[in-house]
Image: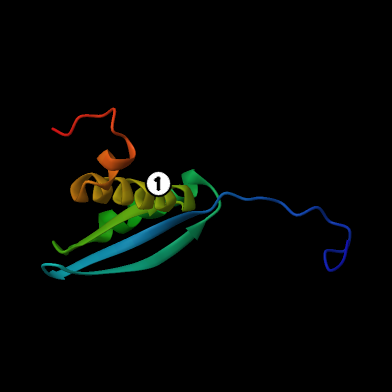
Amino acid sequence: MFGNNGKKKENKMVWLVIEKNVYTTPMEEFSVKKKAYSLKEAIEYQSALEKLNDRDNQSYFIATEIQDGMNYVIEKHNQSVADGSYYEKHPEIKRT
């Protein structure tokens, strides 16, 4: 109603083409190289960057907000298994 001039807000899926540079273990640097609004556009840009890439310590991948969220959930789950808190919350599951 206010500030959008009567236009309906669109939810657009965003794909990010991320550049990863590894300098020394565990030193890694990430930067967004492209913000794309279609998977096809992101893949084409990633492919072009990979073809031009002549560095062994540099790679490219595509990320979404959903992927980042899932990575966080997986990390927290693995951490709870490692520290044993998962088994405390789920006594029906035997620790291996």
x and y percent of residue 34 in the render? 45, 62
Picture residue at 25% right of the left edge, 51% below the top: 79
Query: How many tags in the picture?
Result: 1
Residue matched to label 1: 70
From the viewer's side, name the closer residue of 43 and 22: 22
From the viewer's side, name the closer residue of 30 and 2: 2
| Color encoding of the figure | rainbow
x and y percent of residue 90 in the render? 32, 35
Would you identify the image quadrant in which residue 31 lies? Answer: bottom left
Q: Secondary structure at mark 1?
A: helix
Q: In the shown orientation, is residue 81 left or right of residue 36?
A: left
Q: In the shown orientation, is residue 53 left or right of residue 46?
A: left
Using the image, determine if residue 18 lies above or below residue 66.
below
From the viewer's side, name the closer residue of 85 and 71: 85
From the viewer's side, name the closer residue of 82 and 85: 85
- Outermost residue on the left side: it is 25
Picture residue at 48% right of the left edge, 53% below the top: 65
Three-letter residue code for mark 1? Met
Q: In the shown orientation, is residue 4 left or right of residue 75?
A: right
